[in-house]
Amino acid sequence: MSDLITSHLEEYAGHKFYVEHVSTSSIGNWFRVHMTNGVIHNLTIGYADSIEKAKQEVIKAFKEYLDGVL
C-alpha cells in the first residue's frame, strides 16, 4: 500500500501531470508521475529534508525531462 501523497495537477510545456509519493526505501523516495495521457513515469530521489522537498525535486526533474524530449 502506498503512502498516497499527491500534488495538484501541474502543467508544463502543454503536458499535465501529478506526482504521487509511493514509498521511502534505503535508496530514497520513490515517486510516480502520472500524466493525463495515461503514461506513468517512476522516479527515485535521494533523501531530502522532507517528502515535500523531494516531491518538488521530482517536479523540477520531470520538467527538465520534458524539455529534453520536446
Image (spheres, grey):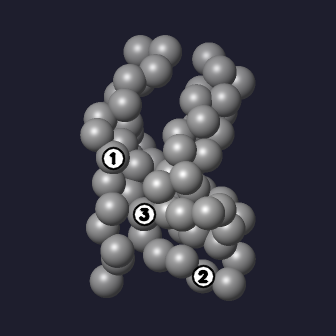
How busy is the neighbourhood of tag 1: few (under 14 within 10 Å), some, or many (20 plus)? Answer: some
- For the residue labelled by badge 1, is the local secondary structure a helix, a strand or a loop? loop
Q: Nearer the viewer, residue 51 or 19?
A: 51
Residue under the image location 28 percent in, 40 percent down: 8
What amino acid is labelled 1 in the image? Ser
Q: Nearer the viewer, residue 47 or 22?
A: 47
Query: Residue 13: x percent and y percent?
Result: 49, 15
Placement of 46 over or under 25, stated as above or below = above
> Label 3, on which residue?
21
- In the rendered structure, the answer to whether residue 68 lies left or right of residue 52 reads right
The numbered disc on residue 25 is 2
> Label 1, on which residue?
7
Query: Residue 2: x percent and y percent?
Result: 35, 76
- In the rendered structure, the answer to whether residue 59 lies left or right of residue 67 reads left
What amino acid is labelled 2 in the image? Ser
Quarter of the image containing the N terminus?
bottom left
